[in-house]
Amino acid sequence: AQKVTQAQTEISVVEKEDVTLDCVYETRDTTYYLFWYKQPPSGELVFLIRRNSFDEQNEISGRYSWNFQKSTSSFNFTITASQVVDSAVYFCALSEIYNQGGKLIFGQGTELSVKP
Amino acid sequence: DVKVTQSSRYLVKRTGEKVFLECVQDMDHENMFWYRQDPGLGLRLIYFSYDVKMKEKGDIPEGYSVSREKKERFSLILESASTNQTSMYLCASSLFGRGNNEQFFGPGTRLTVL
């Protein structure tokens, strides 16, 4: 069965701290995709990154970085030098290559609060 | 700029009413989705559609139906609204593919059923 677990329900940090959001997934497929989305207070989910199961290279985009480890079925997201604008709910999601229609399985979400 | 729009940001309905939530996308996407979002549960898929007039049940279809008469429009219908359907409803769309295409989301409709 497919499942995505984000064990951290809420995280609170002070501005400029680094923070890591955890994501653990379960799938029986060998080919799959992992995603991270950000949901700011306005409500609209914004796509951040997609990673396929054959690409275990870490990715960095500005203050954001992602660590994909197939051995531990994890796809963690780190924000370096956090800012108040990073406050949002972050979702990790899984898509299997053979699923019809491109369905996503979402984790429960982690609410990040960055205080000034 | 890609866009998914939803007919209302906030909606208040009474128990037993028939409720229509409309979603329109302007990206010529084949796939469209309806989710509900509840605290602690993340996003759960209600229904999705990968083509006009095609629909598939998601994880929690009970109490809901959908309609897709045109490619750009996907409607979610609550035949007889109940209080346990109070939630945030999110619509999304994506290109047809093998699970590799990101979904684009609308701003959401916060529905309250009294």
Image (cartoon, rainbow, N blue to C red):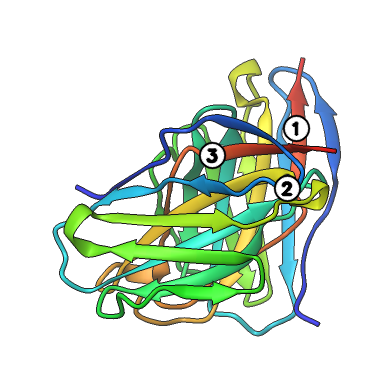
Residue A85, position as x, y percentages in the image: 81, 51
Q: Given the image, on which type of amino acid does mark 1 rest?
A: Leu
Q: Find residue B80 and name its label.
A: none
Q: Given the image, on which type of amino acid does mark 3 rest?
A: Tyr
Q: Is residue A113 left or right of residue B42?
A: right
Specify whether residue B103 is in view. Answer: no
The chain ID associated with circle 1 is B
Viewer-proximal residue, A91 or A20?
Answer: A20
Q: Which residue is mark 2?
A: B21
Q: Which residue is mark 3?
A: B64
Badge 2 and badge 3 in a common chain: yes
Considering only order in the chain, which callout, 3 or 2, is on the residue closer to the N terminus? 2
Q: CA distance from mark 2 to mark 3?
A: 11 Å
Q: Which residue is mark 1?
A: B111
Kindly indicate the quadrant of the structure image that contains residue A14.
top right
The chain ID associated with circle 2 is B
Q: Given the image, on which type of amino acid does mark 2 rest?
A: Leu
User: Is residue A59 placed above or below A1 in the rendered structure?
Assistant: below
> Which residue does the image show at 65% across and 17% down from the upper left?
B83
Residue B95, position as x, y percentages in the image: 52, 81
Quarter containing the C terminus of chain B: top right
* For the residues bearing labels 2 and 1, Cβ distance under 8 angstroms: yes
| Label 3: how many Cα within 10 Å (few below 14, some 14–19, many 20+) | some
Q: CA distance from mark 1 to mark 3?
A: 14 Å
